[in-house]
Image: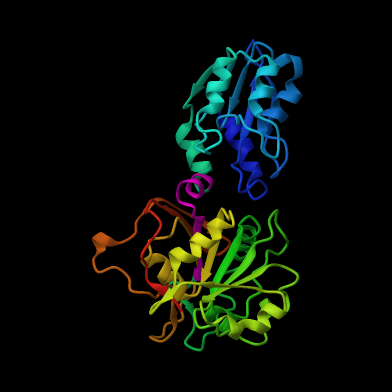
Amino acid sequence: MRRALALAAQGRGSVEPNPMVGAVVLDAGGAVVGEGWHERFGGPHAEVHALAIAGDHARGGTLAVTLEPCCHHGKTPPCTDAVVASGVRRVVAATADPFPKVAGGGVARLREAGVEVEVGVCEAEAVRLNAAYLKLLRTGRPWVHLKWAMTLDGKTATRTRDSKWISGEESRRRVHELRGVVDAVLVGRGTVESDDPLLTARPPGPRTAARVVLTASGRLPERCRLRATAREAPVVVFTAAGHEAALAGWAADGAEVVALPAGDGGLSVDAVLAELGRRRMTHVLVEGGAGVHGAFLDARAVDELHAFVAPVLVGGAHATGVTGGLGVETMAAALRAGEFAAEMSGADVYLRGRFDAPPGTAVPGLQ
């Protein structure tokens, strides 16, 4: 099963919004005779790949698969049909699939056909692997990655707003890899104005992320790289209802302008995530700036953190900090990582953590 999980992970960035799935076939004597993974959205599932390689050697054997086999017609035929036809005696699945058209139906179909089924081997690892898929199914919201690069004293720019470059080449390479496997890279108006970012993955990854800009007021630069490249890679601008006219030039240049409800505090984090989830986006990388980071933290809408800490000190009371927003009143209310790890990234330290808090609902706004 651990081999199947490792195979499944190779589909990251290529299969979403589908789950990552891996499969290994053992013959009747316990020898590996086939393996595969779900390689791309719309393509054959992991079980089909593995069973095709195993051929007649699968008969009387065991299929280990990281997710309950599907039992419905989607972009491909039901995997349960292929499993039954293969003649395997036993199926071991890491976890059930909560997708409504499956949700236990795959297991039931196999048992009806006389196949022995066991569910739960390496279940925690399988759930972790597909945490974003499971969250999207459960909440309708994507998995939110928060990313920043900062100095040792917690600054993301100097007092003159200079920020190029805080992190080193290796850390920037990792950020581009992240951009290449997510569905959207999200920033606020301030980042567009101060940094003029392109927000693309260079070199390209398996996914082309939509570049999402938040501006409740509808104010954005008339000239910037995002607007100039809106026909080359998707740009989506979220603004408050009634401010769409201010972005007519962006729309004319190829950006999609979307109006969302907003209150006195600006755009609702939950409304933004609900719209991205409606588009079946599974992973969203929030790159800043401080106000956007703070709003997502205040909303407790952060699932994963990627922080790159450079061995640099800039000082300055007016230098830009990592997060804004309201923050918590007590340490007991702080958002704490359930998982946390640190590793070197060139001369920088790469901090990565996962959080267990649920997504926000009634939340502060984004300007």
**Any part of residue 4 in sight:** yes
Asked if the magenta segment contains residue 136, the reply would be: yes
Span highlighted in magenta in the image? 133-149
Q: Residue farthest to the front?
A: 242
Which residue shows up at 66% across the image and 34% down it? Answer: 73
Query: Image quarter for residue 40?
Result: top right
**Any part of residue 153 in sight:** no
Image position of 170 (left or right of 40): left
Image position of 34 (left or right of 187): right
Asked if the magenta segment contains residue 67, the reply would be: no
On-image quarter of the N terminus: top right
Which residue shows up at 71% across the image and 80% down it? Answer: 252
Which residue shows up at 56% across the image and 36% down it? Answer: 101
Measured as percent of width and height from the top left, residue 273 is found at: 49, 61
Q: Nearer the viewer, residue 210 or 113?
A: 113
Q: Is residue 143 above or below residue 288?
A: above
Measured as percent of width and height from the top left, residue 295 is found at: 41, 70
Measured as percent of width and height from the top left, residue 244 is found at: 58, 80
Measured as percent of width and height from the top left, residue 56 is found at: 75, 14
Which residue shows up at 49% across the image and 60% down it? Answer: 274
What colour scheme has been applied to the protein in the rendered image? rainbow
Q: Is residue 115 above or below residue 258?
A: above
Q: Nearer the viewer, residue 32 or 212?
A: 212
Q: Is residue 91 above or below residue 300?
A: above
Image position of 44 (left or right of 343): right
Query: Image quarter for residue 346?
Result: bottom right
